Amino acid sequence: MTPQLDIFTEKTILTVSRLTALLRGVLEENFEQLWVGGEVSNLSYPSSGHCYFTLKDAGAQLRCVMFKSAVKNLKFRLTDGMALIVRGRISVYDQRGEYQLICEYLEPAGVGALQTAFVQLKEKLALEGLFAEAHKSAIPRFPRKIGVITSPTGAAIHDILNVLKRRFASLAVLLYPVRVQGEGAAVEIARAVDEMNRLGDVDILIVGRGGGSLEDLWAFNEEAVARAVYRSKIPVISAVGHETDWTICDFVADLRAPTPSAAAELVIASSEELRSQVDGLSHRLRKTIENILVSYDRRLEGLRRALHDPRMMVGHLAQRLDDLTGRLDMGLHVAVSRRRDRFERLRDALRHNDPKGMIDLLLQRVALLLVRSEGLLAHRLEEIRQGFGDNAARLEVLSPLKTLARGYAIASHACDGTTVTDAGSLAPGEQLLLRLHRGAARCLVESLETGNT
C-alpha cells in the first residue's frame, strides 16, 4: 500500500533517514517487477561477489546492483558496452540517497544468455589453446576396452552398445554413469573423465548424450568439462546430441562424432571389415612373396649359367699363382742386387771420407792459423806502439804547456773565462786571469795599448 504523504503539515519535520525510508517504500511497492533495457557501463566486481554497473541510454542512466546469489546463476560474462535486458525491482540505497535497480535476471539484448555464454567461453578457451590440433591425440585403431561416460538410462548408451555388439561383439565396454543435464551434471562429467584417467583401464573415452535443446546439452558447454577433457591422457571422442549440435566439448575432444551411434562406429571397425581387410592383406602378401620367389628363381638361374667349372677356375688360379711367384722371386733378386751395389758404393764413399782423417787435417789447419794469428797480432801491436810514440812526440812539440814553460801566459776574462786575443776587447779596471806554466794570477787592467806591437 502506498504511504499517505499528504498527511504531513508544514510543521512536520522529517529526518533524512526517515524521508529516504518513505521514498524507498513508495518505490519498492510500485516498481516490484520491471524489465529495463540499456547499455552497460562502469562495470565492477568487488571482492564481495556482488556486481555493480550502470544501465544507460541516450537520455538517462540508472544505477544497478546484482547480488552474489544471482551473479552465481549467470551463464555469461558482463562487459562494458553490452546491451542488456534486465529484470528487477527499484529500491533506494540509503547511504547515498540514490535509487537503484536490484537485478534478478539478465540476458543480452537480441541474443540468448546461453548463446552468449557459449560464444564467450569458446573464445576464451580458443585463446588458451584448448582447441589446438597439436594437442589432440590419435584414436587407437584396435582398442581393447572402451570407456563410456553418459547416463546409464539414456538412449546414448543403448545406441553405443547396440552398434558395438553388431560391429565387434567381443570388445569390452566400461560405463561410468553420470547425469548429463541439470544442476551439477558438468561437475559429475568432469569428475568421471579424471577418474577414468586415474584408473587407466581403457584405451578410448566416449563422452556424450542424446539430443536435446541448448539447455539440455548445456552441461557439455561448461568450462569444467572442457578442461577435464583437455587434460585427459586417454583419447576422448565427444558424442553430444545430433549432427547439427555443437558443444564446447566437441571442440576440445580429440575427435567429434555427430551422434553416439557414430562414435561407436568410429571407435573400431566392424569384424567383417577387419576380416575383409585381413583377407586383402593376406592376398597381397601372398602375391608379393610369390613375385619375390619368382625373381629369386630367375636370378639363381642366371648365376648358375654364369658359373664355370670350378676345377678349371682352380687351374687358372694355380697357373696365375705360379706366374706371380716367379715374378716375385725375380723382383726380390733384382731388388737385393740393387741394394747390395748401393751398399758397396756407400761403404767406399765412407772409407774415402773417413771422419778421423778429416779431423786430423782440420786440427793441423787450426794450429797453423793460430801461429799465423799470433805473429800478425804481435806485428800489429808493434806498429800501434810505434805510431803512438810518434804521435806523442808531435803532441809534445805542439803542446801549449811547452809554450808556457818558455815564459808565455794565457790571458782570459775573469767574468766568463774567454781567452783574450785583442786588447780592444778589454776595459780599464777589468779583471783578467793569467794562466802561467805553474799556477795562475788575477790582474787588474789599468791602461790599454791597442797598437799592433
Image: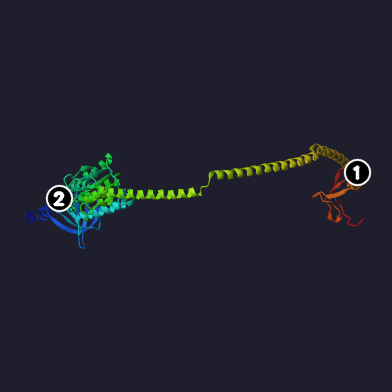
Asked whether disc 2 touches disc 1, contact meaning CB atoms under 8 Å apart, the reply is no
Characterize the local packing of mark 1: few (<14), some (14-19) or many (20 or more) Cα atoms within 10 angstroms.
Answer: few
Nearer to us in this view, 114 or 171: 171
Q: Amino acid at mark 1?
A: Gln
Residue 205 position, x and y percent, is: 26, 45
Left or right of residue 233, residue 346 in this image: right
In this figure, which residue is indicated by the disc labeled 1? 386
Q: In the displayed structure, would residue 350 be above or below residue 264?
A: above
What distance separates the C-alpha of mark 2 from that of mark 1?
Answer: 144 Å
Q: Mark 2 or mark 1, which is nearer to you?
A: 1
Q: Quadrant of the C terminus?
A: bottom right
In this figure, which residue is indicated by the disc labeled 2? 17
Q: In the displayed structure, would residue 207 be above or below residue 31?
A: above
Single out the residue that lies furthest toward the bottom: 58
Left or right of residue 250, residue 298 in this image: right
Q: Amino acid at mark 2?
A: Ser
